[in-house]
Image (cartoon, rainbow, N blue to C red):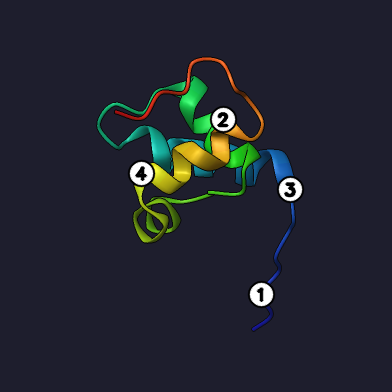
């Protein structure tokens, strides 16, 4: 039996956003920003931590990022 994998970056990105969107307080816009800074899954976000993830987002989008 052969297994065929088709790489489709748009499909993969949508799957990643769906995974991130399931977390509390993460909407579409934040999920997109997380993917832009290469935080592509719930597991990656948990391993990185919320503060470091926001710092990464601040490197691409300085407005609207606030850490208290």
Q: Position of residue 2 (x, y in %)?
A: 69, 80
Q: Which mark is residue 50?
A: 4
Q: Nearer the viewer, mark 2 or mark 3?
A: 2
Q: Position of residue 50 (x, y in %)?
A: 35, 44
Q: Choose the circle earlier in sequence order: 4 or 2.
A: 2
Q: Regarding mark 4 in the picture, which secondary structure is present there?
A: helix
Q: Choose the circle earlier in sequence order: 1 or 4.
A: 1
Q: Which residue is mark 1?
A: 3
Marks 1 and 2 sit apart, C-alpha to C-alpha, by 30 Å
Q: Regarding mark 1 in the picture, which secondary structure is present there?
A: loop
Q: Which residue is mark 3?
A: 8
For label 2, the crowd category at 10 Å Cα-Cα, with few meaning under 14, some 14 to 19 and many 20 or more, is many
Q: Choose the circle earlier in sequence order: 1 or 2.
A: 1
Q: Is residue 53 left or right of residue 49?
A: right
Q: Nearer the viewer, residue 43 or 22?
A: 43
Q: Nearer the viewer, residue 25 or 8?
A: 25
For label 3, the crowd category at 10 Å Cα-Cα, with few meaning under 14, some 14 to 19 and many 20 or more, is few
Q: Can you tell which quarter of the image residue 21 is in?
A: top left
Q: Choose the circle earlier in sequence order: 2 or 3.
A: 3
Marks 2 and 3 sit apart, C-alpha to C-alpha, by 17 Å
Q: Can you tell which quarter of the image residue 66 is in?
A: top left
Marks 4 and 2 sit apart, C-alpha to C-alpha, by 15 Å
Q: Residue at x 59, y 22 (%)?
A: 62
Q: Nearer the viewer, residue 51 or 39?
A: 51
Q: Position of residue 58 (x, y in %)?
A: 57, 31
Residue lying at the far bottom in this picture: please name it. 1
Q: Which residue is mark 2?
A: 32
């Amino acid at each position: 039996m052969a297994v065929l994998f088709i790489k489709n970056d748009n499909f993969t990105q949508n799957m990643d956003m769906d995974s991130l969107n399931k977390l509390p307080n993460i909407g579409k816009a934040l999920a997109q920003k997380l993917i832009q800074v290469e935080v592509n899954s719930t597991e990656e976000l948990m391993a990185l931590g919320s503060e470091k993830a926001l710092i990464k987002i601040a490197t691409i989008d300085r407005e609207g990022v606030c850490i208290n």
